Amino acid sequence: MKKINKYSRRKFLKTTSAVAAAITINSGFPAILRADNNIKIGVPTILSGRVAQLGISVSNALKMAVNNFNNAGGLDGRNIELIIRDSRAKPDEAARVCRNFINSDKVDAIINAEASGASFAVQEVVRESGTLCLHTVSETSRLTADPSIRTWNAFRFSRQGIHDAVGSASYAATVIKEKGLKTWMSVNPDYAYGRDSDDTFFWALEKFAPGFKILGKGWPKIFQPDYTEVITQIAREKPDAIYTSLWGGDLVSFIDQAALYGIFKNTQLFAINLADYTTMSAVKNLPEGLHSATRYVAAWPNTESNRNYDKSYTDLYGDHPTNWSWEASVGIDYLISAIKEIGSTDNKKIAEYMKGKQKESFMGVGEGNTVKIRESDQTIVDYSIGWGTTVQQDPYMNNIQAANWSTIEALENEWLTDKGWL
Amino acid sequence: MGFLKKDNFERDAFIGLIVWIFLLIFYFVIPSPGIHDIIQKVFILGLFAMSLNILIGYLGLVAFGHATFFAAGAYTLGLFLQSSIVNNLGSLSIPAAIISAIFISTVLAAFIGAICIRLKDIYFSFLTLAFQMLIYSIILALVSITGGDQGLMGGFPKPPFLGIDLGKPFDFYAFTIFISIITIVLLRQLIESPFGYGLRMIRDNPDRPAALGFNNQRHKLIAFIIAGSIAGLAGSLQALLDVGAYPEWAFWAKSAEPLFMILLGGMHSFLGPLMGAFIFEILNDFVTANTRYYGLVLGLVILSFVLGLRRGLLDWLLIKFYRK
């Protein structure tokens, strides 16, 4: 009896291996060798693990725009084909996926939806290949602020840390005046983004409301489940205000745990990444009156086109868009307009088209609700940055104040000069 | 052609040359950059896995922190090519950078190895892991030098040398495979030398070679240093390919990759890890192109190898068809 079982198991494994090999040979290699007339866009992103929501919401936004383009007849019958692949947030994997897009799939452009580390890897691949690249998602300013990293064929359609920092500090300064906040603490994730966010926020706050005192800084690890040690530090120091750039599940855990200690009764929380539907809806009892930047909410910008965008997305996917969605949507929108206007996918012509291009957008707060790709560093400006306070039900945000882009750009120039990048 | 019958350096070098020429012809016969990319990655990862197999397969020491040397090689090469030394060295920059990468990895392996080889079994494994996490933390902390968790940014130049321009896909392909084959041929001489058999003796029964007058510790240390230097070479080639270096390469999960390759290809045949790298890379390419459940598929494949074949693929093939 025992022998029969052993035989069956081996036979099963052999059969399984043979089937797996056959599938590999039959469907794997043709993908490498495939070629057709479609306009191909490669999208390296994160589709697995704790931040899979990033890749999913970017993919949704891109598919929505591409379906509209294809249903309208494409470019002289040429449809856009999205090739979306998971890099598992590994920089070398993102580089490999990109090289494959360029070499095997012969993509016309890359929409990079990677987090910061992998975005720098993607930048190096496209610098070598000259492939048109639209960065979405990564918020690290250095990607476009440092001239040594820029390349003619890469454009940023994602928020930038320094823009958010100035917007945040200018809003915080008004609350400081109103409520007389003097002492601060910060809780930021212990990696480049968190450290940059902390540096730039307090650097900008010093410009708007000097004289505050920092009582302490907490640096929890990314994806840390327990924030007790940071929260007890806050309970001990009793600061008037806390600044945090925690995001996603980390921010949810922090707020849930800090609320149990009653931290938010006497302390104002400034959470730059809170106002995203997926984050706010995940907080068990969202305390009212927390301060947050508007990552993406239908209530801001308060325009018909923004509400329509939210509705179209929600109708299609049964879930609200995220901050990453709008970035991808604006990026693909620019690309589609360029392709339509130029009538081809020539990367040099598209790059020329994009430089300095002002375009009406649901996220635009420039003249006539426009965003702009600034020519000097090929990065998006005039996108909506607002701060407000949380409420428990939809629209989740109240008392939203818009950041002033001329103030942002003035201080950004000062910051760039300090860094030696201007 | 009489030398082909003997198992010696000439024969290995000849076979290596034939394989290299075959792969160069293959480059033009199948002009698919995607497949070329896979082949050069297989050789880079193969070197990485083969270097670890010196410790696992031939010495019986399971090192969990082998990516330390991979990352050391990658960062050394990247930092070297980003520095102003390139302006002075000009066309010698790439060879000098690769030699520096191997040198730094060797020194690091000598230092870490001297401490780790004093321990056995799980204690050895975890000490190598501890050193790896130490190096990882240093890379993250030295933001101004290493770029911290963003990695080395801004790329680096690849000045042509001896008519080889690594910025050109064919030159890079030919160069990477050439360097890898030379290393593999030299490694085989080492493994088949009395030194290599000494390693097997230490693995099988450490007391016996010690009783015969062997200095086990010195043997282990030399093996550890050689393994580290080859991993450093692999890291430097990877950095050349990606034009950057990333802290993820020094993270513990990176050390698991060559372990998977050894499991897939086999630890008891010399080229087993290279075959493992091939399976790993093909799986990676195929799975990420078709599904997001990479971990699940990789886990199932490893499970089928471990439970079904009970050894790596090359080990299994050799037993089934050759060593009957």
Image (cartoon, coloured by chain):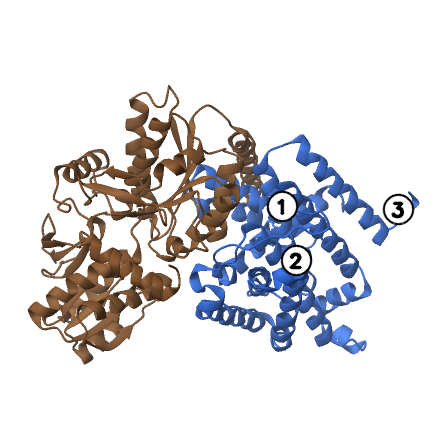
Chain colours: A brown, B blue
User: Which mark lies nearer to you, 3 or 2?
Assistant: 2
Q: Secondary structure at mark 3?
A: helix
- What residue do we see at 88% from left, 50% from top? B6
Q: Nearer the viewer, residue A161 or B231?
A: A161
Q: Amino acid at mark 2?
A: Gly
Question: Disc 2 is attached to a residue of which chain?
Answer: B
Rendered image: mark on residue B90: 2
Q: Amino acid at mark 1?
A: Gln
User: Which mark lies nearer to you, 1 or 2?
Assistant: 2
Quadrant where the image shows the N terminus of chain B: top right
Left or right of A345 in this view: B245: right
Looking at the image, the residue that sits furthest to the right is B2
Calculate the distance from the C-alpha at mark 3 to the C-alpha at mark 2: 44 Å
Rendered image: mark on residue B40: 1
- What residue do we see at 42% from left, 49% from top? A88
Q: Nearer the viewer, residue A270 or B230?
A: A270
User: Which mark lies nearer to you, 3 or 1?
Assistant: 1
Question: Disc 3 is attached to a residue of which chain?
Answer: B
| Label 3: how many Cα within 10 Å (few below 14, some 14–19, many 20+) | few
Q: Which residue is mark 3?
A: B5
Looking at the image, the residue that sits furthest to the bottom is A236
User: Quick check: do tags 3 and 2 share a chain?
Assistant: yes
| Label 2: how many Cα within 10 Å (few below 14, some 14–19, many 20+) | few
Q: Nearer the viewer, residue B265 or A192?
A: A192
Among the two numbered marks 3 and 1 on one chain, the one whose residue lies closer to the N terminus? 3
Q: Amino acid at mark 3?
A: Lys
